[in-house]
Amino acid sequence: MAVMWSDTKIPRYLQVYQYYKDLIVAGKLPPGTKMPSVRLCAARLQVSRTTAESAYMYLAADGYIMSRPQSGFYVTDRGQNEQKNQERQTKGKKGKKAIEYPFASSALDQESFDFDLWRRYVKSALRQDERLLSYGEPQGEYELREAICRYLSENRSAVCRPEDVIVGAGVQSLLHILCPLLGAGKKVFVQNPRFKQGSAVFEDHGFRRCDSPEAADVLYVTPSQMTRWGDVMPVTARMELIRDAQQSGQFIIEDDYDSEFRYMNRPTPCLQGLAGGERVIYVSTFSKLLLPSIRISFMILPPSLREAYEARKDFYNQTASKTEQIALCQFIRDGHLGSQIRKAKRLYTGKARQLCDTIEDVFAGEAEAAMGQAGFYIRMEISSPLSLEEMTVRAEEAGISLIPVKEEGTVKKFLLSCSCVPADCYKPALLLLKEVWKLKKG
């Protein structure tokens, strides 16, 4: 199969990258499809093996394909998701305008991450031929677990060793390992009702949901992000939670996502560290710190569960990409994770403050805006005779997505994410919002 390549100055490997990306996004290479080997790709497209390998590296770095040791490259679901998003946007032809200002989106700002730097680390990892010929360690690459321990000890006051850390592709995959260790038939209290994926895993393993933390055997809590707006559990409340759980023999699963994004002060020490590592299972992910497509999460087991895991770990395959684990390990060792967090915090702190100021400027006393302690959302309170639902619908019809929160008489509360919408779009978006809500000054 020969392809007519362009004679432009675009490098050939980027043209190969775009060729396969278009096939993946169009659905012609559906998720799970095995890609041609580098050798076969080069032969089919009549390019060099180096060109084919570079194109595959960029496809993997951008999340369109993933490497499976001793098997090859496979198409991920990213292209399918992009296709679905495009289809949603085209539905504007039926009267509903495409979302132009997605303040309800949890996507990240493109400026928050250095893609070129990450690609260099992925490319370096792909050069480790001998290491990539073997399967990854079921528990995760040891060097990465060492790097995670050092980082958590210095930045989250965690107490752990590499032997305590388990790496996986997403929190769900880790919960599938954890649930059998905790035992069947347990009662679980999930603090965040929006965590439906985790709740589904608990149900799959026969756990029973309960509404009261006192009646539960296992507590699933998010102390660094208690609400979507960003309320953080103070140290005194954390110590009380630990004391009560230890007295009643409960296990605590601490999901520490977004813990680094504190706007006003340093992150609060994690429950796991405050408990000395006892009866607290620490879970976190690199998806928000780096990119959602980098599906590397990890958990720290307490001593009481580690022995049970050692007896079962050979039954589990590693779900995270070995290539990405190698790249991430060196990325952390070279100090780039800390730099990345500082860069992202500066960006999102500035955007959050700018969004608050723009809301109050545009609505000129008719609305109030406030930043949370952490996270990416701004709370907006506005007085209007319209219902919360009607205001949300009008906004969507104008191409603006918001998160409706609460209605208290004429006062309506919304959450707006500062992360996805470019800062220079805040004012035109809010002027349009004011117009569709038909709010008059004074």
Image (cartoon, rainbow, N blue to C red):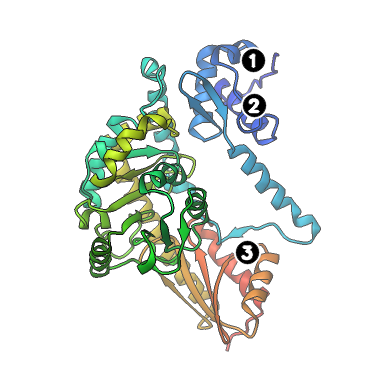
Q: Three-letter amino acid code at disc 1?
A: Leu
Residues at marks 3 and 1, CA–CA distance in whole angstroms: 43 Å
Which label was assigned to residue 203? none
Say which of 135 and 104 sits in front.
Answer: 135
Mark found first going from the N terminus, 2 or 3 = 2
* Residue 159 in the image, given as x and y percentages of width and height: 21, 48
Q: Three-letter amino acid code at disc 2?
A: Tyr
**Extreme residue toward the right, this view:** 94
Within 10 Å of disc 3 (Cα), the crowding (few <14, some 14-19, many 20+) is many
Within 10 Å of disc 2 (Cα), the crowding (few <14, some 14-19, many 20+) is some
**Quadrant position of residue 168:** top left
Residue at 65% of width from left, 77% of height from top? 437
* Element at label 1: helix
In the picture provided, is 315 more to the left or to the right than 381?
left
Mark found first going from the N terminus, 2 or 1 = 2
| Placement of the C terminus among the 4 image quadrants | bottom right
Image height check: is 87 above or below 17? below
Looking at the image, can residue 56 be seen? yes
Which label was assigned to residue 45? 1
Marks 2 and 1 close (CB-CB < 8 Å): yes
Residue at 19% of width from left, 53% of height from top? 276
Q: Which residue corresponds to mark 2?
A: 19
Residues at marks 2 and 1, CA–CA distance in whole angstroms: 10 Å
* Element at label 3: strand
Q: Which residue corresponds to mark 3?
A: 400
* Residue 288 in the image, given as x and y percentages of width and height: 42, 49
Residues at marks 2 and 3, CA–CA distance in whole angstroms: 33 Å
